[in-house]
């Protein structure tokens, strides 16, 4: 393993020190490993809390700020945060209007956020509502699994629900926006290489040079199947085929198309993939209204990408365009 | 007698086994999960042992409760809530110093894991080892066998349950996302919970 670290045990704590130093507009609670907006809690505004395992940077700490999250909890690498962390984040963002938890559908994340909500409910009258994202079409037969994973759509849910909360809308409405975006979003990912978890010290799986994994999640776990390496054009088709099959993307006001890098893929390849995605969508008669291209939800040093489409309505597009000022997403300000 | 000292010995022995087998657990998790089970559980059990050292030996249930809250505070992922719930429910149900009380506590812990994880036997999870261990413990004690022998039977049943997870297709947890590809690998949760039962058999031997 070759990584720019001090000690595998200190990776998350050391990274949070750097984040605090780089972004004075954030406040980092190092004991609880929570990244807050420096001005949290904001009175009368619904607080948005998300979080999960570390190793997905900039998710979620990079999305804390005006127009998006109020706090993000950083678990160990690929391990969900513990209830105490989530509870600390929830208390810290409660401005009297309630708190929304945005949780990716992974067993550990769901259980720890649930336990945190129980902890907070036992001691205060803060209203907490959780929205669980589950957009990954790679998970088939979801009745017989832990359900679809929450992946790329989480970034878009955080952006759009964050914009709704910034407008001062009540908790029920902000939660409804989050659920609606999740329901309108589908994702599929692929990997060219495994990643190396610092504590494990070697790649999670071996992948020969001439093969790729289709249907991966965001934790370096293997995908649904392994297939021969193909040109980007065919990869785009392979990723979009199940996405388009699962949700009728025609009609509406066009889709928000999100091509996400897994951490080890350069932007030149992501733009190249985006061009192929646009071509496939054109052929399918699906219009792209907005887009996002870059590495926003990563799997450490894994090479590969995912594609997320959200069938957007007029309100979603308006919320997408609303100003946002966070370390990783910033526009309109 | 299954007193506070005996239960502390159990927790210590489990922590020792997890530390010793840390890489093996992580290797199992690499095959069908995300390669952190050994590291996470080792971190949590090390913290649990430290917490027990810091508190004076009190009620037996307090040993299990401290272990539970420490695991919930330090492990994260699915293992933290599941192992934490096991020890928390066991602490709540422990009402005596004999084998029957221990079996009742362990059964309550098992029920807690079922409720928290919303899984059942056959889903390729820790329940596939913990369930048979509970059954074997109850059966042996009901048949009048001494605790030492009953825990030995429970450890054997856990190991057999663990091995039987290999051909299963996972239906819960992160391995479930692999579908058919999850078959052919032992479940890491079933492997670690087998260590928990083996630790009980070792640490509580001669205390029944």
Image (spheres, rainbow, N blue to C red):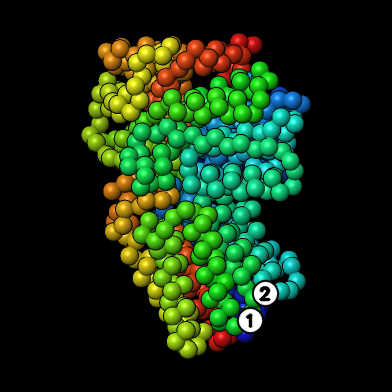
Q: Chain of mark 2?
A: B
Give neighbour class at mark 2: few <14, some 14-19, many 20+ (Cα, 10 Å). Answer: many
The spot of residue A267 in percent (x, y) is 43, 20
Dividing the picture into quadrants, the one containing residue B8 is bottom right
Residue at the disc numbered 2: B60
Q: Chain of mark 1?
A: B
Element on which disc 2 rests: helix
Q: Residue furthest front?
A: A172
Q: Which residue is mark 1?
A: B97
Location of the C terminus of chain B (image quadrant): bottom right
Q: Is residue A55 visible?
A: yes
Q: Position of residue A1 (x, y in %)?
A: 45, 44
Image quadrant holding the N terminus of chain B, namely bottom right
* Residue found 58% across the figure and 37% down from its top: A130
Q: How many marks?
A: 2
Q: Counting other residues with Cα less than 10 Å from the Cα at mark 1, is it few (<14), some (14-19), or many (20 or more)?
A: some
Q: Is residue B15 left or right of residue A215?
A: right
Task: Report if residue A85 is visible in the image.
Answer: no
Q: Are dots 1 and 2 on a single chain?
A: yes
Q: Which numbered disc flags the more N-terminal residue, 1 or 2?
A: 2
Left or right of A33: which side holds B166?
left
Q: Position of residue A182 (x, y in %)?
A: 47, 28
**Are the residues flagged by discs 1 and 2 in contact, CB closer than 8 Å?**
yes
Q: Secondary structure at mark 1?
A: loop
| Rendered position, A307 above or below A123 | above
Q: Quadrant of residue B100?
A: bottom right
Q: Is residue B153 above or below residue A303?
A: below
- Camera-nearest residue between A260 and A167: A167
Residue under the point 37% across and 13% down: A251
Could you say which is closer to the camera, residue B146 or residue A11?
Answer: B146
Q: Residues under labels 1 and 2: Cα distance?
A: 8 Å
């Amino acid at each position: 393993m070759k990584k720019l670290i001090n000690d595998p045990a200190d990776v998350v704590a050391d990274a949070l020190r750097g984040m605090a130093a780089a972004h004075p507009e954030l406040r980092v609670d190092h004991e609880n490993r929570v990244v807050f907006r420096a001005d949290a809690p904001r009175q009368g505004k619904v607080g948005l809390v998300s979080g999960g395992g570390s190793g997905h940077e900039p998710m979620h700490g990079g999305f804390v700020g005006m127009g998006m999250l109020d706090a993000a909890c950083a678990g160990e690498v690929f391990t969900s945060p513990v209830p105490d962390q989530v509870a600390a984040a929830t208390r810290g963002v409660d401005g009297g209007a309630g708190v929304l938890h945005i949780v990716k559908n992974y067993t550990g994340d769901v259980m720890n956020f649930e336990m945190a909500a129980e902890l907070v409910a036992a001691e205060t009258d803060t209203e907490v509502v959780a929205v669980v994202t589950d957009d990954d079409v790679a998970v088939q037969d979801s009745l017989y699994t832990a359900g679809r994973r929450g992946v790329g759509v989480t970034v878009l849910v955080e952006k759009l629900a964050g914009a709704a909360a910034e407008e001062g809308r009540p908790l029920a409405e902000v939660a409804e926006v989050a659920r609606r975006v999740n329901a309108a979003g589908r994702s599929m990912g692929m990997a060219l290489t495994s990643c190396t978890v610092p504590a494990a010290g070697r790649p999670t799986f071996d992948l020969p040079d001439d093969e790729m994994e289709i249907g991966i999640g965001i934790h370096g776990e293997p995908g649904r199947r392994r297939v021969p390496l193909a040109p980007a054009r065919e990869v785009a088709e392979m990723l979009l085929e199940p996405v388009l099959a699962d949700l009728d993307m025609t009609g509406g006001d066009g889709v928000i198309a999100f091509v996400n890098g897994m951490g080890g893929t350069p932007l030149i390849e992501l733009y190249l993939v985006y061009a192929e995605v646009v071509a496939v969508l054109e052929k399918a008669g699906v219009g792209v209204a907005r887009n996002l291209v870059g590495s926003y939800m990563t799997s450490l040093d894994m090479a590969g990408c995912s594609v997320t489409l959200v069938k957007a309505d007029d309100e979603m597009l308006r919320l997408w365009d609303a100003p946002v000022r966070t370390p990783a997403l910033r526009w309109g300000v | 007698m299954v007193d506070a000292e005996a239960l502390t010995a159990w927790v210590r022995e489990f922590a020792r086994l997890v530390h010793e087998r840390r890489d093996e657990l992580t290797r199992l998790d690499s095959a069908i999960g995300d390669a952190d089970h050994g590291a996470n559980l080792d971190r949590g059990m090390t913290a649990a042992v430290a917490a027990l050292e810091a508190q004076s030996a009190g009620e037996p249930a307090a040993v299990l409760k401290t272990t539970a809250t420490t695991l919930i505070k330090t492990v994260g992922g699915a293992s933290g809530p599941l192992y934490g719930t096991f020890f928390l429910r066991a602490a709540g149900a422990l009402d005596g110093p004999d084998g029957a009380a221990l079996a009742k506590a362990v059964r309550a812990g098992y029920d807690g894991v079922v409720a928290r994880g919303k899984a059942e036997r056959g889903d390729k999870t820790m329940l596939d080892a913990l369930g048979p261990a509970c059954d074997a413990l109850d059966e042996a004690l009901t048949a009048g066998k001494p605790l030492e022998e009953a825990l030995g039977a429970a450890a054997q049943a856990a190991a057999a349950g663990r091995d039987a997870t290999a051909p299963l297709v996972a239906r819960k947890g992160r391995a479930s996302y692999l579908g058919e590809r999850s078959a052919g690998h032992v479940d890491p949760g079933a492997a670690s919970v087998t260590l928990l039962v083996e630790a009980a058999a070792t640490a509580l031997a001669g205390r029944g």
